[in-house]
Amino acid sequence: MNFGLLSLLIWLPIVAGIVCLLMGSNRIAAVRWVALIASLVTFVASLPLFTGFDSGTFAYQFVEKLPWIPAFESYYALGVDGIAMPLVILTTLMTIPVIIAAWTVVDSRPAQYYAAFLIMEGLMVGVFSATDALLFYFFWEAMLIPMFLIIGIWGGPRRVYATIKFFLYTFLGSVFMLAALIYMYVKAGDYSIATFQGMPLTLVEQRWIFFAFLLAFAVKVPMWPVHTWLPDAHVEAPTGGSVILAAIMLKMGGYGFLRFSLPITPDASRELDMLMIILSLVAIVYIGFVAMVQQDMKKLIAYSSVMHMGFVTLGAFIAFQILDNSGSITGAVLGMQGAMVQMISHGLISGALFLCVGVMYDRVHSREISAYGGVINRMPKFAVFMVLFALANTGLPATSGFVGEFLVIIASFKANFWYSFLAATSLILAAAYTLWLVKRVIFGPVANDHVAHMEDLNIREFIILFVLAVLVLLLGVWPQPLIGVMETSLHHLIDQMMIHKVPL
Amino acid sequence: MPHTDVTLASLVLALPEIYLTVMICAVLMVDVFAGPKRRGRSATFTQFTLVLGAAVTAFFSHPDQRTVIFDGLYVADELAWVLKLSGFLFVAFALLYSRTYLERRGILKGEYFVLVLTALLGVFVLASANSLLTLYVGVELLALSCYALVAFDRENGIAAESGMKYFVLSSLASGILVYGMSMIYGMTGTLSVDQLADTLRASPNLGVLLGVVFIVVAVAFKLGAVPFHMWLPDVYHGAPTTVTLFLSTAPKLAYFALAFRLLGQGLQGVVEDWSLMLAALAVLTLIVGNVVAIVQTNIKRMLAYSTVANIGFIVLGFVAGTPGGYSAALYYTLIYVLTALGSFGVVILASRKGFEADRLDDYKGLYKRDPLLAFIMMVLMFSTAGVPPFVGFWAKLRIIEELWATGHLWLVVLAIVTSVIGAFYYLRVIKLMYFDAPEEQPGTDRQTGVRMALGLNAAAVVILGLLPSPLIDLCARLISFR
């Protein structure tokens, strides 16, 4: 079974990206095909992760282990469990629409554009599949470089401000995590994540490490109040950049909480879970209102992302209170499942919404809501998709957006009624801002000449939106395959969270 | 016991120095006979000397074990061997980058090559010094050659001024060094690094402590640690770019050796006294270096302050005061030199006759004018900022690791916060090259050979970043060799 599948998923896109770079923008027709084929092959190659996955065990699967830096006991060690595997597939999936969406749209330095996204894909798969903390950090930081260039080179008018803010914000968060990882290495003697999860740590140490992780992951998620880089980055990034940012990079924060914060510092997490819950609820309620008043479509979706990621952190950190109140492990697992489903579903929906905005932007070259109106008259096919994704974003039943939020809200009932009450306001707030957006942009009479000249979806745009729409609906009515693969791993995570790591 | 007599075996161990001394005379002769019309020959011959020297060092003078020769004045160990070997190689690359630059400006003179080689000889003496006297001789040989190098472009007023400044301040530091050494000698009665290591123990008397203070100040000055850094930006800025390039290569190795032989070996017994002093210097150095670099508009000055900031990291390695800390500092020094070599190489190639690309704004839109050069610079800048997958990340990681191992929590926090501040000005260079439109369209220097060397340099930064293990192991072995 083990033939280096994960390595293939990491290095194939990176090598393809380098090939694109070397071919250069003069042979752009060929470069496009190389990029497309590479991303398709990577996606197809990632499917055996799902089909060959043994959901009966929480152990890492598809493991690879080669010595990397013997002096640090650090290995090139890869493997996925039920938490990482869906995210890896999400990564390989979402790169394809990015490549297709850029087909005729990106005209400045296109080869480099494709190369950046392919290299990025490999690095992101690396982040999710590394089981060595140093390797994880290596990919985690390296990923900033292509994103920095993507926003800075192909972004909008304020791209330089946005990209430097993005880089420094995430860099600042990450270096504290690095310091924490090195501290644990010095104490434990190797860099394996499993060692860190098993090592005893005093409560004081756990608190420091927890806050170091919090800085790294909260910036990435992003949680209120360190979310301010995200609207800037999203607004200025090119369409592909926004898609990857929203669909995958934000998930790394949530993944980090599940892989590092909760199992490595369970006692500190238990102690500080109230902080995390409050921050999550602020993100859900307050950012919901902020999203309502946005004039810029991308900014609105960006704030909506912050709000929806609030469910991820909420679902993860209510587990302690559920366990304390009812001792119900299934209840805690429910919240975790909600968090995970929310990550995958938000990856699909926000990615699709950014693609939709990209479709309109390519035609009118404006992201202002006021520049549109009555798009449905000119683009009926597009309007169907846009309305579908908008409704999914509000958490309409039968879409994937419903499943995650519903699970988290149900679970939070077991913790505290007011949590679920506040979290449920999101259903109203999200509906309010999303439907208002749809009303102003899609419906009504044709607003101006630009809109009057919009052409409906071409075949490429149709295909990518269609595939995403099918997935959103499929996960909405039949989430069991997704929930099934992660169940054992999440149970194991809850077990790890219940261990007291403080040495007696 | 040290060998007291000069034997063939001991001469072979000192082969790099002997070879270099002979070749310096040979370069002088070649230059005289080549005459002003065929100055290029001296350059070629010097290149040949360096490459051959690297081969001679590599194949004939590898010490199998630590050997002290020449009445205890000279030590041949693997650390010195590696420092000499990398000295040859780094300087060979530096001269390769420099040659056309000098030619186009009419300052390709024989004395340039002779001075570079004598400075390198100073580096070698320092690398192998096992006595306070040898150390001092090495420091002076290196410093005197460097003063002359900085000012060797006689027509250039700024270069002369910075040469003068360098001379005055650096001589003062040399004076302080020898004063501190004399105090240590007075209190212990020995000049030998080995005997100092054996006799000096914790809680020394006031005389020794005073000597240590003077020595720390002098070492900090030579390295360029704040508040003894004032000479460094002026010299880096004022000197011809090729000289700046040279100054940031071999001399850095030498001053690492100076710090290690003096503090890490000779004064290891009083480590607790000097490591606190160094910690204070490191804090200042990291803050001042990184913050002041942000406001620079001249790239040479910016890189000078970036050097100061990097010196802060090297000093942090010494603060740890353990073999691990020294090996981290050695690793950091080697990586820093590798990266600085490339960065100044790019500055040289971006310039043309009559146009010094030394303002940051000269790099606007470099991507459009010269994609390869811009790409190399980007790799080097990300590496210096400490972003993986480039090697600069591992250098910073090693230092932080050793600080944790010795329990310096606040220094870890300071190191990581200042490296984020530092990331800002490295990113700005990338921003100028990639995100801004070019102001004008001056071509860059298209020298295929130099470009290949520069590409090799950047490739080393990437490959050592992906597979850092061999160099990390080597550095650990060199320090534990004793």
Image (spheres, coloured by chain):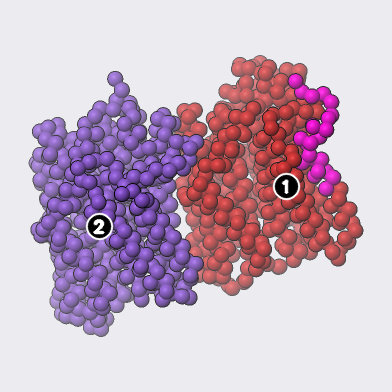
Q: Which residue is at a point 60% across and 29% down the rendered structure image?
A: B480
Please give the residue where the numbered disc 2 appears in the rendered image.
Answer: A347
Mark 1 element type: helix
Contact between marks 2 and 1 (CB within 8 A): the answer is: no
Chain A colour in the picture: purple
Label 1 amino acid?
Ala
Chain for numbered disc 1: B
Please give the residue where the numbered disc 1 appears in the rendered image.
Answer: B55
Mark 2 element type: helix
Chain painted red: B
Q: Which residue is at a point 72% across and 28% down the rendered structure image?
A: B67
Q: Quadrant of the C terminus of chain A?
A: top left
Q: Which residue is at a point 50% across and 70% down the rendered structure image?
A: B437
Chain for numbered disc 2: A
Pinpoint residue B460: horizontal percent, then vertical percent. 57, 52
Give the extent of the magenta segment.
B1-24
**A301 or A197: nearer the eye?**
A197
Q: Which residue is at a point 24% across and 34% down the rendered structure image?
A: A496
Nearer the observer: mark 2 or 1; the answer is 1
Pinpoint residue A397: horizontal percent, then vertical percent. 9, 58
Label 2 amino acid?
Gly
Pinpoint residue A321: horizontal percent, then vertical percent. 16, 35
